[in-house]
Image (cartoon, rainbow, N blue to C red):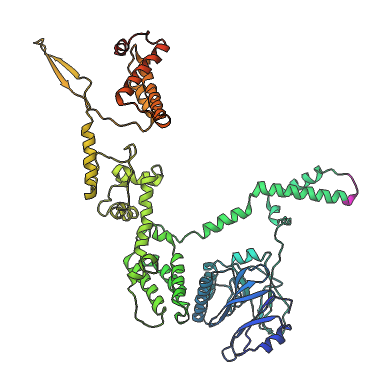
């Protein structure tokens, strides 16, 4: 059997298959198998595998598909395989696509799916076909939604033929696989084998294990389309000079040409792989809303609801535990495009409908009748720590995502979008939020986000810094009962600081008919803030000194204070000696006097004379 590790036979037309029959087909004792019985003389699937290569972990039998979760014996790699025998009726095809989507969502493993899909993917895959059918559109959507890879078929264009004089041919058999499956099984390709007794051609999926090492060199035909490429090749070829036999010269010229081609390709076209990834990312951006569309429109949210229903309805609730249902509900919710929820408030009717879909699936399954709901849904949505099951409350989750923009508005002050909104509506609270959007005017997008500020601000706290972004004196601070004592102590501390005026501002006004002067005495206000550190203290002291004859003495004063404090600290720590406040003051004055005398700032004199010399 072509030395295959896994074989999938389609249309067995057998309701029951036993081990004896399987061993006769496989030809070895090292075989395991699983089967899906036929519906009378139609259908039937048999999957066989070498037990020395893969091990069966789980099995799921569908209506028209058979899925197995394997583990490789050699490297313990987990993956899943699905054999399918597709129906000819469109409604039954839809059931199969939902069934397969459910299997993929449940196991969430690298996936390979193969068999007779009974539908083509492209127009060229059926002889005489000139337009796309609805079944082809659904099949393409299935492949795209699950991110599957459909590789070209080698060895022929079609996999089925009616073998009649007026031939009807199509490619309805194929393998599809996920990118992570292909990453593990490198060099994957599928090819058609010679036709045997059936009207179907058997196909085989090959893969190699050339991991590591340098990639082989291939000549790209698209290079020939570049202007001047042939002349460039000739110039390179003529520039190579080697000595030796003709075969040696040819081999070395080809090697040099290969290196030049690689370098030129890298410079001319860049990293094709990276460009491909960027393009694929742009093609698979989160679902977006058409420009100008209303976010409350039914047409916008219906596709999301349909996907959610389709993902859950493919599972039979009877065969799933409550834990399995919870896992499915959370996985389908996580696949909802957060692009919608992070920009637009979810309509109430949409949230109610999604909640209903989840509730029905949890208690009775989608479309499986009505059963009593044993626990209130609001309790189900509570976190585990509060006795719930941790399912997202959609409306709360939606508000949390919208709150992200309120946070970014306050923190990303230089962002262009933020500047546009601030210029249009103005700002409040030191720029932490915009003003409310009045009436029915304004950008509906920001208007709905701004409405959540009242609820969002309840979870904010402000740490006071320099007061640039928080208006300390103008804000209303909500004081609780337990804080009143702290506020009272703070006010007592303020009152204990006696700030006195250093002088008066005087303004003189003379009347033309009188020489009397009107003197207005105005006491200026004092606002005193403690420096944040030693360097700030020294800077304040230095900048506050006036130009006078004793300025150098005053500049030395803080250094002398710090020196005396340091000395007193060491005396108390290491000598167990302690001076009182008066002694410390005397030590400070005496030290400053000695420093000034040593620096020739004042002559050696008494302490009284020194203090007098410090006056302006």
Query: Is residue 375 shown to the viewer in this render?
Result: yes
Q: In this view, does 307 lie to the left or right of 71?
A: left
* Res 24 → quadrant: bottom right
Query: Is residue 295 shown to the viewer in this render?
Result: no
User: Residue 501, percent across and down?
Assistant: 21, 23
Residue at 29% from the left image edge and 23% from the top image edge: 582
Residue at 38% from the left image edge and 70% from the top image edge: 354
Number of on-image labels: 0
Residue at 41% from the left image edge and 78% from the top image edge: 366
Kindly report the secondary structure that dominates the magenta region of the rendered protein: loop
Q: Which residue lies furthest to the left in this view?
A: 513
Q: In this view of the protein, which residue sits in the foreground, 604 or 78?
A: 604
User: Residue 448, percent across and down?
Assistant: 32, 56
Q: Is 246 within the magenta? A: yes
User: Residue 288, percent across and down?
Assistant: 44, 60
- Assign the C terminus to one quadrant of the image: top left
Q: In this view, does 287 lie to the left or right of 238?
A: left
* Res 538 → quadrant: top left
Q: Identify whether 210 is placed above or below 169.
A: above
Question: In the image, which residues are magenta?
Answer: 243-247
Q: Identify whether 277 is placed above or below 434.
A: below
Q: In this view of the protein, which residue sits in the foreground, 347 or 430?
A: 430
- Assign the N terminus to one quadrant of the image: bottom right
Q: Which residue lies furthest to the front in this view?
A: 576
Q: Identify whether 44 is placed above or below 573.
A: below
Q: Residue furthest right?
A: 245
Q: Is 129 within the magenta? A: no
User: Residue 327, percent across and down?
Assistant: 46, 71
């Amino acid at each position: 059997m072509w030395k295959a590790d896994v074989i999938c036979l389609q249309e067995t037309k057998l309701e029951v298959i036993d081990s004896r029959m399987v061993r006769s087909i496989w030809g070895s004792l090292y075989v395991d198998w699983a089967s899906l019985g036929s519906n009378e003389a139609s259908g039937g699937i048999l999957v066989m595998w070498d037990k020395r290569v893969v091990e069966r972990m789980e099995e799921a039998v569908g209506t028209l598909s058979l899925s197995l979760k394997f583990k490789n014996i050699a490297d313990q790699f987990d993956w899943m395989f699905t054999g399918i025998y597709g129906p000819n009726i469109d409604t039954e095809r839809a059931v199969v696509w939902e069934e397969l989507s459910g299997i993929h969502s449940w196991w969430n493993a690298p996936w390979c799916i193969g068999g007779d899909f009974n539908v083509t993917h492209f127009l060229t895959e059926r002889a005489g076909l000139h337009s796309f059918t609805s079944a082809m559109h659904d099949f393409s959507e299935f492949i795209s939604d699950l991110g599957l890879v459909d590789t070209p078929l080698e060895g022929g264009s079609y996999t089925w033929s009616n073998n009649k004089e007026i031939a009807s041919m199509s490619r309805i058999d194929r393998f599809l696989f996920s990118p992570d499956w292909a990453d593990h099984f490198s060099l994957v390709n599928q090819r058609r084998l010679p036709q045997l007794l059936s009207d179907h051609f058997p196909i085989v999926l090959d893969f190699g294990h050339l991991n590591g090492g340098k990639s082989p060199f291939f000549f790209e035909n698209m290079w020939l389309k570049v202007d001047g490429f042939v002349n460039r090749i000739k110039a390179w070829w003529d520039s190579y000079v080697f000595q030796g036999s003709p075969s040696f010269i040819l081999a070395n010229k080809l090697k040099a040409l290969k290196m030049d081609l690689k370098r030129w390709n890298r410079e001319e076209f860049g990293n094709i792989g990276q460009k491909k990834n960027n393009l694929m990312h742009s093609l698979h951006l989160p679902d977006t809303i058409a420009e100008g569309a209303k976010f409350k429109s039914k047409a916008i949210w219906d596709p999301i609801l349909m996907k959610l229903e389709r993902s859950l309805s493919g599972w039979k609730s009877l065969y799933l535990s409550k834990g399995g249902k919870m896992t499915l509900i959370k996985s389908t919710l996580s696949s909802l495009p957060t692009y919608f929820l992070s920009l637009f408030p979810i309509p109430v009717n949409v949230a109610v409908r999604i909640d209903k879909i989840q509730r029905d699936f949890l208690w009775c399954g989608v479309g499986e009748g009505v059963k009593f709901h044993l626990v209130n849904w609001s309790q189900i949505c509570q976190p585990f720590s509060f006795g719930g099951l941790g399912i997202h409350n959609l409306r709360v989750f939606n508000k949390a995502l919208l709150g992200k923009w309120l946070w970014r508005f306050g923190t990303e002050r230089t962002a262009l979008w933020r500047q546009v909104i601030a210029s249009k509506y103005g700002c409040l609270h030191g720029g932490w939020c915009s003003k409310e959007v009045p009436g029915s005017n304004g950008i509906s997008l920001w208007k709905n986000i701004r409405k959540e500020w009242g609820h969002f601000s309840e979870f904010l706290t402000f740490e006071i810094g320099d007061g640039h972004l928080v208006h300390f004196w103008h804000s209303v601070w909500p004081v609780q009962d337990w804080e009143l004592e702290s506020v009272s102590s703070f006010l007592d501390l303020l009152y204990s600081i006696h700030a006195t005026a250093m002088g008066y501002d005087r303004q003189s006004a003379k009347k033309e008919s009188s020489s009397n002067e009107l003197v207005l005495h105005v006491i200026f206000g004092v606002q005193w803030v403690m420096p944040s550190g030693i360097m700030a203290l020294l800077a304040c002291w230095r900048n506050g000194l006036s130009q006078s004859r004793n300025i150098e003495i005053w500049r030395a004063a803080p250094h002398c204070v710090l020196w005396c404090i340091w000395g007193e600290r060491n005396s108390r720590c290491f000598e167990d000696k302690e001076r009182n406040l008066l002694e410390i003051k005397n030590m400070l004055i005496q030290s400053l006097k000695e420093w000034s005398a040593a620096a020739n700032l004042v002559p050696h004199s008494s302490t009284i004379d020194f203090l007098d010399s410090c006056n302006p």
